[in-house]
Image: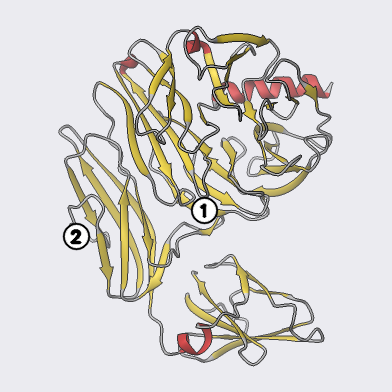
């Protein structure tokens, strides 16, 4: 009975959103499904999507999902009806062979030549010719997406529960989907589609919320996630993600099709910093382009990755030089940047640098123009500029840092103290930017949690705080946001 229920769940889930882009075995190599002048085609690129060749525009019109094998030149696609096809010649037309008729729309390649995963239900070690079933004990709810880790036998699945409207769950397996357990819960509506893709190192996992356009990343097997970016895509635009072959690499496929296919465009967004910034490639063009403003920013030192439960923003010490990156879509002839959202244009450059000389929160607005339309993207409270005093040199310019996460934080922050401290009692002092102690926490544990309150139990004001332990031998700097 469990298998019958799961079949129905998988079919319904993946018809609406399936994998349209996949990494190849080499760096820079990707395959993706996109529009052609006559329908849909399989494209192949060896330069990160900057240029692409249409390999087949006939048989793959029925393709619902695509994945590339670890072996060079091998690529698969699956139809809505569950037929699995394989090509051993990079997907060239007339190189496809039907090898299975009982595959779900969702497929994933393994990290070994010839391995392919049929959702969480089974896997093949012989290029899809036969499949080994999994028990998936502990599975519950409705399956949304799944992925395997680079580390052997570890895998993940995203599920929701029909009668739990405000939660989505991440399950993990340590024995190749024989058994599953809950790893993390997300405060997402259960109707939101959440897609996952692995990175290049053990425990790395990208998570993309298609509804909220959130790009999140974990490097600890899904224990914690950072919210690295929020994108500006219309609901009518199809998009899919896949991790690459380099550290921090992420690809996003964007297919924009309207007016019954009279306008059709494909874009590849390529990132090498875990989705914080992107380079945009326009691989197929037909008719008028859409117009969408997209941007992000980085500061010197890269303080720009935030906790998944807070809003993504950038921080730094005044005066703060900020590099802005536009990866806006469209035939753009004018960029208008408003770096404090006061209605005054501050720059017309595509990728400007701006220096902030006052402290506080800043909202950023980018407006782009083509010959027909305009589009704006506002990132509210996207930048926080603070001012340091001499306390910075006293407490934080040393190599003995206290580990803490998430940082910045809004609700609570966890500190992992060094194990070479005295085991009887650990005393941690918290100072504000003026050097005044706001709280002292004593604990027998190596892990200490601070909820952002002062010695009186009142919430501290947002800003930079300094943490010291054991006669200031160990220290850290944290940012309380609200």
| Of residues 397 and 407, the one drawn nearer to the viewer in this rendering | 397
For the residues labelled 2 and 1, the Cα–Cα distance comes to: 27 Å
Q: Is residue 194 above or below residue 64?
A: below
Name which quarter of the figure residue 288 lies in. top left
Mark 2 falls on what kind of element?
loop
Q: Residues within 10 Å of mark 2 (few under 14, many from 20)?
A: some
Q: Quadrant of the N terminus?
A: top right
**Disc nearer the start of the sequence (2/1):** 1
Mark 1 falls on what kind of element?
strand
Q: Is residue 165 left or right of residue 331?
A: right
**Residue 475 locus on image (x, y percent):** 59, 82
Name which quarter of the figure residue 132 lies in. top right
**Residue 456 locus on image (x, y percent):** 62, 86
| Of residues 188 and 238, the one drawn nearer to the viewer in this rendering | 238
Q: Residue at x 45, y 61 (%)?
A: 304
Name which quarter of the figure residue 439 lies in. bottom right
Q: Is residue 456 left or right of residue 45?
A: right
Q: Residue at x 43, y 45 (%)?
A: 271
The answer to whether residue 118 shows anywhere in this view is no
Q: Residue at x 58, y 75 (%)?
A: 452
List the residue tagged with mark 1.
227
Q: How is the image coloured?
A: secondary structure
Q: Is residue 377 above or below residue 460?
A: above
Q: Residues within 10 Å of mark 1 (few under 14, many from 20)?
A: many
**Residue 112 locus on image (x, y percent):** 68, 33
Q: Is residue 314 above or below residue 191?
A: below
| Disc marking residue 346 | 2
The answer to whether residue 108 shows anywhere in this view is yes
| Number of callouts | 2
| Of residues 222 and 386, the one drawn nearer to the viewer in this rendering | 222
Q: Is residue 443 above or below residue 380?
A: below
């Amino acid at each position: 009975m469990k298998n019958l229920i799961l079949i129905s769940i998988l079919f319904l889930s993946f018809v609406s959103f399936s994998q349209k882009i996949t990494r190849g075995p080499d760096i820079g190599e990707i395959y993706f499904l996109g529009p052609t002048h006559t329908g849909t085609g399989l494209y192949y690129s060896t330069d990160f999507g900057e240029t692409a060749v249409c390999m087949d525009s006939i048989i793959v019109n029925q393709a619902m999902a695509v994945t590339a094998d670890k072996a060079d030149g091998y690529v698969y696609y699956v139809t809505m009806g569950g037929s699995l096809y394989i090509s051993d010649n990079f997907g060239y037309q007339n190189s496809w062979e039907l090898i299975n008729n009982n595959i779900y729309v969702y497929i994933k390649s393994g990290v070994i030549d010839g391995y392919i995963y049929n959702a969480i239900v089974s896997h093949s070690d012989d290029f899809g010719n036969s499949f080994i079933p999994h028990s998936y004990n502990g599975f519950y709810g409705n399956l949304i997406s799944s992925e395997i880790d680079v580390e052997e036998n570890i895998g993940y699945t995203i599920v929701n529960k029909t009668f739990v409207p405000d939660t989505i769950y991440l399950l993990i397996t340590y024995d190749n989907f024989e058994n599953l357990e809950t790893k993390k819960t997300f405060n997402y509506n259960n109707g939101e589609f959440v897609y996952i893709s692995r990175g290049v190192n053990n425990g790395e996992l990208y998570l993309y919320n298609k509804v909220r356009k959130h790009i999140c990343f974990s490097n600890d097997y899904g224990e914690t996630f950072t919210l690295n970016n929020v994108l500006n895509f219309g609901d009518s635009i199809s998009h899919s993600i896949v991790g690459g072959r380099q550290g921090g690499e992420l690809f996003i496929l964007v297919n924009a099709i309207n007016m019954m296919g009279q306008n059709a465009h494909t874009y590849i967004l390529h990132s090498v910093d875990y989705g914080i910034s992107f380079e945009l490639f326009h691989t197929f063009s037909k008719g008028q382009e859409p117009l969408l403003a997209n941007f992000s920013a980085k500061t010197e030192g890269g303080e720009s990755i935030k906790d998944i439960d807070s809003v993504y923003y950038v921080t730094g010490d005044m005066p703060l030089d900020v590099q802005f990156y536009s990866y806006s879509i469209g035939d753009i002839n004018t960029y208008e940047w408003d770096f404090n959202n006061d209605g005054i244009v501050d720059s017309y450059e595509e990728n400007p640098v701006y220096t902030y000389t006052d402290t506080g929160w800043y909202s950023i607005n980018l407006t782009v123009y083509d010959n027909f339309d305009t589009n704006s993207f506002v990132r509210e409270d996207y930048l926080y500029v603070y001012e340091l005093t001499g306390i910075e040199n006293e407490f934080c310019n040393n190599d003995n840092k206290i580990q803490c996460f998430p940082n910045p934080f809004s609700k609570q922050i966890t500190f992992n103290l060094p194990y070479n401290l005295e085991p009887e009692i650990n005393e941690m002092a918290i100072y504000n930017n003026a050097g005044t102690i706001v709280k002292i926490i004593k604990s027998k544990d190596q892990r200490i949690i601070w909820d952002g309150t002062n010695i009186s139990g009142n919430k501290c004001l947002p800003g930079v705080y300094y943490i010291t332990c054991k006669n200031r031998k160990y220290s850290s700097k944290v940012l309380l946001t609200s």
